[in-house]
Each structure stands twice: as C-alpha cells, then as structure tokens.
Image (cartoon, rainbow, N blue to C red):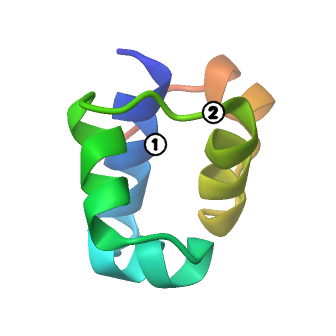
Amino acid sequence: MNTMARLVAERKCRGLTPHDMAARLHVSQACICKWENGQRQITLRDAEAYAAVLGLSLAVLDRTRVTS
C-alpha cells in the first residue's frame, strides 16, 4: 500500500471526510480528492501536513500497518 493510500485509510479510520481535511489543510476539497485519487501528486510538505492532521508522522506511518 502506498503512502497516500495509507493516509486515506487513516483518515477514514478517524471518521474524517475529504471536506474536513481540506478545511484543516487550507486547500480545496478538489485538491484533497485529486491527491487521494492519484490525479495530482502530493508534495512532501503537504503529505507531512496531511499526516500531522491525523496525529501521525510520515516516518511512523512507513513503519506501521493500518488497521481498520
């Protein structure tokens, strides 16, 4: 599972919607959806911010498995 797929799984586990993430990251909901669908590449900085909203770091995410 790639990093973005893991982040999406973590978002869903926490009951957050793309709209919630957009509001917290100060980007459009369309931007979140494009990142999540692979239509737009997420930058490292944005991926770190996305993970931080979920209370994670990318380093921790790479070492753990997502449980749903």
> In front: 28, or 14?
28
Query: How far across and how far down the image is residue 18, in percent?
Result: 30, 68
Q: Nearer the viewer, mark 1 or mark 2?
A: 2
* Left or right for 19, reference 3: left
Disc 2 is placed on an element classified as: loop
* Left or right for 48, reference 18: right
Question: Which residue does the numbered mark 2 point to in the structure image?
Answer: 43
Answer above or below: position of 24 versus 64.
below
Q: Quadrant of residue 41?
A: top left
Question: Which residue does the numbered mark 1 point to in the structure image?
Answer: 7
Near mark 2 (Cα within 10 A), the count class, few <14, some 14-19 or many ≥20, is few
* Left or right for 10, reference 60: left
> In front: 68, or 5?
5
- Residue 17 visible within the image: no
Q: What residue is shown at x 68% (from left), y 19% (from top)?
A: 63
Query: How far across and how far down the image is residue 48, in percent?
Result: 72, 44
**Mark 2 belongs to which amino acid?**
Thr
Q: CA distance from mark 1 to mark 2?
A: 14 Å
Q: Earlier in the sequence, mark 1 or mark 2?
A: 1
Quarter of the N terminus within the rendering: top left
Answer above or below: position of 2 versus 60.
above
> In front: 8, or 43?
43
**Mark 1 belongs to which amino acid?**
Leu
Q: Quadrant of residue 64?
A: top right
Answer above or below: position of 18 versus 6.
below
- Residue 46 visible within the image: yes
Query: How far across and how far down the image is residue 43, in percent?
Result: 63, 33
Q: What residue is shown at x 64% (from left), y 51% (from top)?
A: 51
